[in-house]
Image: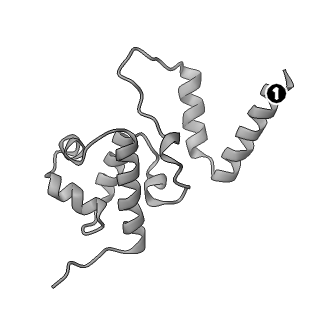
Amino acid sequence: MPKKKCSDIDALLGQNMSFYRKALGFTQQEMADKLHINRTTYTKYELSLAEPSIDFIRKISQILGVDYNMLLGYTPVYKLSDVQREPDSDITQTPNELRMLELFREMDVKKQRSLIDFLEADKTAD
């Protein structure tokens, strides 16, 4: 008997988990290790053969550095080249940069686009 697939939301969650994991260069085993679960269990989440709990979704989003809404598909998935893992070098972020990122992630997609358009227009005005 074939295994039952999860709902459409769970399928999108699995696809997004896989997308962001690969974008950051993590293997399924690395993700499983970070979550303290078996790799097979993690793989089932990505294949939508099992449903992670909300606590796991929160942990996964923290590891991947994305809002959990992005994992659930409430904001668009970007091209692989748009997502980058911070290098292990001494790159630091100022408190203002961190706050901007925090606020940006809380915005809906239209507001994000408007802010980007504003910043790009301001940059070209100089």
Q: Quadrant of the N terminus?
A: bottom left
Please say whether residue 8 is visible from this viewpoint.
yes
Residue 52 shows in the view: no
Residue 91, compared with residue 52, is above or below; it is above
Observer-nearest residue: 69 or 77? 77
Q: Residue at x 69, y 52 (%)?
A: 110
**Relative image position of residue 14 (x, y in whole percent):** 35, 60
Check the image and report above or below for 60 versus 84. Answer: below
Q: Is residue 13 above or below residue 25?
A: below
**Residue sitting at x 34%, y 40%:** 63
Which of the pair 117/102 is nearer the observer? Answer: 117
Q: What secondary structure is marked by label 1? A: helix
Identify residue type, mark 1: Thr
Place of residue 17 in the rendered image (x, y in percent of width and height, measured from the top left): 36, 53
Q: Quadrant of the C terminus?
A: top right
Disc 1 residue crowd, few under 14, some 14–19, many 20+, Cα 10 Å: few
Q: Which residue is mark 1?
A: 124
Which of the 4 image quadrants contains residue 34? Answer: top left
- Residue extending farthest to the bottom is 1
The answer to whether 125 is drawn above or below residue 33 in the figure is above
Residue 54 position, x and y percent, is 33, 58
